[in-house]
């Protein structure tokens, strides 16, 4: 069982999952040849008996991918920052799509000399259902690194894989284009499907040919063009998919340029795609080659937990969701409601405003995991939609513990790396106790690399692996090692395993 602890410090595949727009230079860095589909590598078998610490075995260092920094894929920077453009200091960027603060609400910067608050130390972790847990990966990898990343997820033990798809990257030129990136994604998803993972794709970022407004990112002028693209994906690799999220954080103008920033506008985009996905599922029931018994799950775009702010370009997520209901969302009984319930530095059990309000980021319900979840559920019930469930397509806790320099955002100093892990486990446990919550997807596995850490990119703070060896940071290492959160999740989804430590 000593091997369990050894695996706890094994390198992981570096994956950058930017929810921000993919820059042309970044796309150019992706291999241009369509990779050959290879059989997935075997997932290492990890002993399940309880390890002991009676002796120190020699380190096991499996071959790991090189720590190559990758660029943004899609999504908001909440899973990542907006673009990689620095946000003005007058408006601190929240974790993934967090509330917008007025200048008077911004707390003073926390100096690096202030140690992070220690979090609770778990004794026995809960037995969590891995079928309701997942993590997000960036597909902009070569096939070798993609396979290693899948092995890391298989070792972690969660069931769901989320891939966020940049429509403009897959179809830069025309509506019927099957680009090299399109075919590569098809191969990667087939490989993931062979691993037994449930696959959620999130589709966003219309290509230039589908938009008259070329500012930042946004939806197509004609919602039917998105439905056409989703139809094309389902035709080519729908058999590998389990769920589709239609767009990402449309309550942020950087993701919704060219259309009114409200829920009714989003519903106009959603409906053609919703109908197309359901039609596909209906056809597949009687497919002569491979009938599909379970229909594809359809999820509304996860909304950024944020308040109204005209300067930043954000619409309050609660108001946005109510506008979606005003436009007919409750008429869709088989849809999941997407949510991004980040918690900043506040424990998942806490609600606003129980913390000491002199520290900051604790005086607004948008900063609290439980407040975010409860607010969305209350709106669903109010609108007669209680038969549907929430699907957390993005969520996490950030920490800069053991990373050099000041954290990218002062509130990140509130969480040390043990807090990150225990908060994540508790949030998963709470979600699984709620009958209205579906799966919860963690952001992210391994965005922390030499570039993101050196540049103090807040995305690195959410990562549960980082470059290094034996649980220690080494920016020049080609290996990956883990934060305690990784091994807490590993432990929590295995009833017969109880690790005595988590590399802390």
Image (cartoon, rainbow, N blue to C red):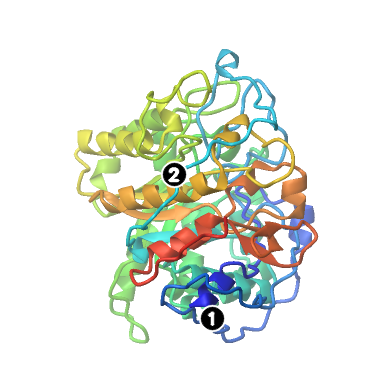
User: Could you tell me which residue is drawn at 49 percent across and 59 percent down?
Assistant: 135
Q: Secondary structure at mark 2?
A: loop
Q: Secondary structure at mark 1?
A: loop
Q: Is residue 184 left or right of residue 241?
A: right
* Residue 271 seen in the figure: no
Q: Nearer the viewer, mark 2 or mark 1?
A: 2
On residue 120, the disc is: 2
Q: Is residue 117 above or below residue 143?
A: above
Front-most of residues 253 and 285:
253
User: Could you tell me which residue is drawn at 51 percent across and 73 percent down?
Assistant: 4
Among the 4 quarters of the image, the one containing residue 167: bottom right
Front-most of residues 85 and 356:
356
- The residue where tag 1 is placed is 44
Q: Which of the two labelled residues, at mark 2 and mark 1, occupies the earlier sequence position?
A: 1
Q: Is residue 40 above or below residue 438?
A: below
* Residue 59 seen in the figure: yes
Front-most of residues 378 and 448:
448
Give how far across and how far down residue 211 sits, in percent. Answer: 61, 44
């Amino acid at each position: 069982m000593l091997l369990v602890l050894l695996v706890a410090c094994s390198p992981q595949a570096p994956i950058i999952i930017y929810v921000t727009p993919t820059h042309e230079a970044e796309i150019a860095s992706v291999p241009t040849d369509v990779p050959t589909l290879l059989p997935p590598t075997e997932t290492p078998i990890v002993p399940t008996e309880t390890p002991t610490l009676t002796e120190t075995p020699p380190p096991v260092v499996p071959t790991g991918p090189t720590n190559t920094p990758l660029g943004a894929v899609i999504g908001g920077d909440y899973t990542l920052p907006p673009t990689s453009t620095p946000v003005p200091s007058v408006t601190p960027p929240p974790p993934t799509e967090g509330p917008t603060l007025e200048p008077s609400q911004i707390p003073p910067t926390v100096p690096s000399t202030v140690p992070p608050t220690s979090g609770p130390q778990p004794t026995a972790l809960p037995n969590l259902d891995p079928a309701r847990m997942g993590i997000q990966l960036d597909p902009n990898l070569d096939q070798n690194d993609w396979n290693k990343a899948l092995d890391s997820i298989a070792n972690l033990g969660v069931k769901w894989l989320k891939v966020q798809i940049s429509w403009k990257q897959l179809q830069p030129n025309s509506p019927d284009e099957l680009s090299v990136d399109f075919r590569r994604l098809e191969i990667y998803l087939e490989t993931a499907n062979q691993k037994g993972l449930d696959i959620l794709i999130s589709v966003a970022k219309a290509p230039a040919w589908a938009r008259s407004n070329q500012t930042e990112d946004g939806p197509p002028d004609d919602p039917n063009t998105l439905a056409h693209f989703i139809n094309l994906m389902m035709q080519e690799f729908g058999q590998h998919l389990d769920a589709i999220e239609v767009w990402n954080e449309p309550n942020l103008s950087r993701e919704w340029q060219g259309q009114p920033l409200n829920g009714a506008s989003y519903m106009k985009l959603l409906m053609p795609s919703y109908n197309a996905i359901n039609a596909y599922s209906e056809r597949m029931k009687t497919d002569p080659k491979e009938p599909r018994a379970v229909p594809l799950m359809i999820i509304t775009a996860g909304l950024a937990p944020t308040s109204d702010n005209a300067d930043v370009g954000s619409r309050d997520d609660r108001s946005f969701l109510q506008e979606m209901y005003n436009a007919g969302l409750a008429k869709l009984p088989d849809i999941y409601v997407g949510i991004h319930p980040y918690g900043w530095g506040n424990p998942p059990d806490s609600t606003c405003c129980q913390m000491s309000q002199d520290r900051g980021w604790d005086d607004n319900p948008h900063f609290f995991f439980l407040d975010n979840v409860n607010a969305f559920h209350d709106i669903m019930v109010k609108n007669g939609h209680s038969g549907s469930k929430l699907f957390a397509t993005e969520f996490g806790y950030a920490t800069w513990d053991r990373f050099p320099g000041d954290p990218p955002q002062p509130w990140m100093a509130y969480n040390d790396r043990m807090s990150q892990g225990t908060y994540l486990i508790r949030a998963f446990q709470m979600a699984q106790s709620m009958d209205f919550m579906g799966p919860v997807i963690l952001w992210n596995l391994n965005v922390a690399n030499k570039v993101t850490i050196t540049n103090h990119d807040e995305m690195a703070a959410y990562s549960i692996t980082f470059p290094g060896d034996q649980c220690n940071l080494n920016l020049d290492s080609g290996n990956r090692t883990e934060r305690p959160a990784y091994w807490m999740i590993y432990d929590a989804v295995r009833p017969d395993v109880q690790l005595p430590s988590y590399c802390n």
